Amino acid sequence: MKVVLFNGSPRKKGNTYHCLNIVMEELEKEGIECEYIWIGMEKLRGCTACLECIENDDQRCVLPGDKMNEYIQAMLESDAIIIGSPTYFSDLSTNTKALIERAGYATGRHLKHKVGAAVVAVRRAGANHVFSSINFFFLIKEMIVVGSTYWNLGIGKKPGEVLGDEEGVETFQNLAKNIAHVLKKLKS
């Protein structure tokens, strides 16, 4: 079983990283392979709605000059996809949005029945919109969305402050255990 985790924060070791790392550590304790991909500082363009990926039906985006097709391939090769984003003005980071837009078209129906989960870092408020936006992607792709004991968000301002959010840490640990449970059920 394999999980790919995307970090859409431009801060390499910011709060989104720490949130995802909590999930990843728990998944690895369950014997699940994890691939962590930091996309936060990549130069990713949003979708241009050219629809060539749909016409080509090859699970690739035709826009040149970035690593998007590597990210799409990682999604296709994984059993579960976790997308993490910081909260920027009550919304996703730009690169998280670009990933969702372009992978959304290029993957067609090939993500169906994979497991998905959103992970959100927030300073104070606005995280629910980010959480919803990521989960809307999973839902429209016919994926199985896994939750936890609270919405999957960690609260903190300075990098690492989310580690002091006890409820957030527990939420991410429970999320990982729930993902592992679902993956094991699906694979049995």
Image (cartoon, rainbow, N blue to C red):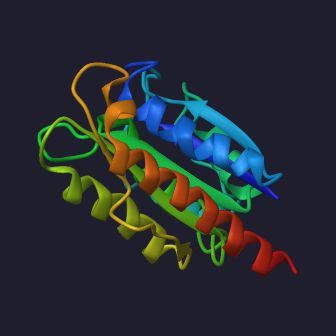
Residue 91 position (above or below residue 15): below
**Where does residue 160 sit, x and y in percent of width and height?**
37, 23
How many numbered discs?
0
Instruction: Assign the C terminus to one quadrant of the image.
Output: bottom right
Seen from the viewer's position, the closer of residues 142 and 163 is 163
Q: Is residue 62 visible?
A: no
Q: Is residue 88 visible?
A: yes
Residue drawn at 66 percent across, 60 percent down: 80
Q: Is residue 15 left or right of residue 76?
A: left
Seen from the viewer's position, the closer of residues 52 and 97 is 97
Q: Is residue 112 left or right of residue 124?
A: right
Seen from the viewer's position, the closer of residues 110 and 15 is 15
Residue drawn at 46 percent across, 18 percent down: 12
Q: Is residue 38 left or right of residue 87?
A: right
Residue drawn at 36 percent across, 69 percent down: 136
**Where does residue 39 sit, x and y in percent of width and height?**
50, 30
**Where does residue 19 sit, x and y in percent of width and height?**
45, 39
Instruction: Assign the N terminus to one quadrant of the image.
Output: bottom right
Residue 69 position (above or below residue 51): above
Residue drawn at 74 percent across, 56 percent down: 78
Q: Residue furthest right?
A: 188
Q: Is residue 2 left or right of residue 162?
A: right
Classify residue 176 by image quadrant.
bottom right
**Where does residue 146 sit, x and y in percent of width and height?**
52, 71
